[in-house]
Image (tube, rainbow, N blue to C red):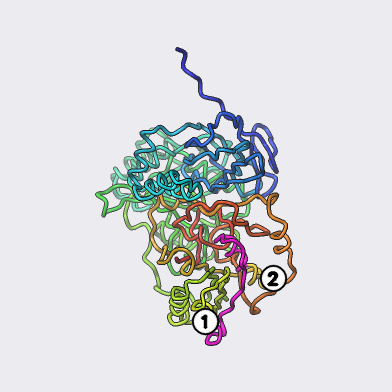
Amino acid sequence: MPTRKPPSFQLRPFKDVAVDAGRFVALGPEPWLELRPTTAFRASATIEICYAAGLADRIARPVLQFRARGGRVWNALMPAPSEGAGYWRGRVPPETVEIRISPTDTPGAFDFAIESVRALSSREMMRLRMASPKRGLFATGARMVQLREEADLNLRWVLERAETQNFDTWRARRRRVTPVAPPTRTQVTISIGAALDAEAVARSCASLLAQTHADWRVLLSDASTETAAWAKAHPDPRISHARRNGDACWIFLRAGDRLAPHALSAFLAEFARNPAFEIVYADDVRPAPTRGGKSEAHFKPDWSPTRQAYSPYVGRAAMLRDEVARRYLDAEIGAPQRLVDAALAEASPGTVGHIARALVEIGDDDATPPRLSKTAPARALARKVTIVIPSRDKGALLTRCLDSIFSRTRNADYDVLVVDNGTVEPAALAALARMRRAEPRLTVEPNPMPFNFSALCNFGARARAAIRSSSSITTRSCCNRTGSRGCSNSRLSPMSARSGASCFSRPDASSTPAWFSAWAASPDISTRGSAGGRTAGSADRSGPTRRRRSPPPASWSSAPSSRRSAASTPTICRSISTTSTCACG
């Protein structure tokens, strides 16, 4: 019997996408591609989609959208392809007739491809259910009693469970080096400091010989006699007698550090995409002494000068333009780490970029300086902050949440906005009234819409939109869940940050109900509440967020929230970087 050939899937431009020289070009911040053929997706099947991004692409979490014939829409945020590829597992809604993907949130050329789509076997489903037995049992039980939405919610928890057990295995499955960025004639100088150990220098140089970008040279500083002799005898002239020839960029490493094969190409592609950048840094991999020497990824947030000032996090996995590097080379600052930190301390706004890929393997376990202070700088505390708390009933939880904020928050200019989602319990109403009388910083905005956490957060943010460049913190203490969910400054499991947990779903504006559109267009939305409140989008936020003009109605499903704080902010978030705000609950 002949073997059935799997269907060949294609991505076609649907909205705000053009094709130029075989590459997709996003014409706006929300481009959409259509996945064909849709008939290959069996209704209600559980599938796994493997997709890849280009080396020069801005890494963002793609949005997957299933559309039914009746106009119903299901959205899901897919894991970011931070190592080149990503995997999404989920169930195909039975009424699906169209499948769309928004792979990026930045205008410009991008490379995005579907590598494979396959149905998960019964054995794989059993393994996933055993990894999350509680959620698997809930999903099966809800399906048996016809609670479809509850079953789908628990199934998403099972399928989107982050693979945090083995970073090396996780990375090997996702690493891609193609398509390689177009070659450039830019010469890169790799300065290797502390070149005392010839074997360590040899490891660093071996990673350079494997680079897809070939125009580079090596300079050794603090080299021992043995290391200098080894370099002089090396057959590659880029190591043995490298000469300056129009250097354009510099990388400063220590002996033993290694670059990924596509590291130089990725750095240069980021510079080419953003000519204003003077410094570009990347994620890195470091040895973990507590894990028997195994590698541990350090996924960094986008550029935040405030955070770098009091808790340096960039490290030395960075490339500097020649004119920037020369200023600090002449100052003889010395160690690579100190040189990069000094350049970052004086960087102008808009001149520092971040590549969300682990491009450097650090050879020692002391790559980042310790925190300089346990408290944030004064300029961060001087910002006006609004804490948005969606709430309904649960008076005891609300009181405890508000008491903790007002009694423990010191030296901060903030106010609190409670979005009342239709509280009817007398005790909760009395608690709200009592707190409003006692605290002038507390404001209550009613919104009895069907519950949707992200929509209520957006509503609260808009109620404080009198000043556009502002900060906002969202808590969940008084909603469906209690307890801390973590903080952006805490150390999170690396794969949980990048590999699987989804944010809330993003709706299609075309199917927004009329009453919701009228509410969003109300002229008094931006003037409610006290003056001086600030909403999300401050300059201190580490990564770009994606905003909607109106919040989504409750008819759209909400995927399990990410453990990273960016997933809990009151804007639709596709950036994978940690933000400078905190999200609890």
Q: Amino acid at mark 1?
A: Ala
Identify residue for label 2.
526
Viewer-closest of 21 and 117? 117
Q: Which residue reaches farthest bottom?
A: 438
| Mark 2 neighbour class, 10 Å CA radius: few under 14, some 14 to 19, many 20 or more | some
- Point out the image quarter for the C terminus: bottom left
**Up-down relation of residue 385 to residue 296 (above or below):** below
Q: Amino acid at mark 2?
A: Ser
Magenta residues, start to end? 435-461
| Residue 112 percent location from the top left of the image | 57, 38
The mark found on residue 430 in the picture is 1
Tell me if residue 228 can be seen: no
**Residue 440 is a magenta residue:** yes
User: Upstream in the sequence, badge 2 or badge 1?
Assistant: 1
Q: Which residue reaches farthest left?
A: 292
Q: Secondary structure at mark 1?
A: helix
Viewer-closest of 339 and 487? 487
Q: Residue at x 56, y 60 (%)?
A: 452
**Up-down relation of residue 396 to residue 363 (above or below):** below
**Up-down relation of residue 9 to residue 539 (above or below):** above
| Residue 451 percent location from the top left of the image | 56, 61
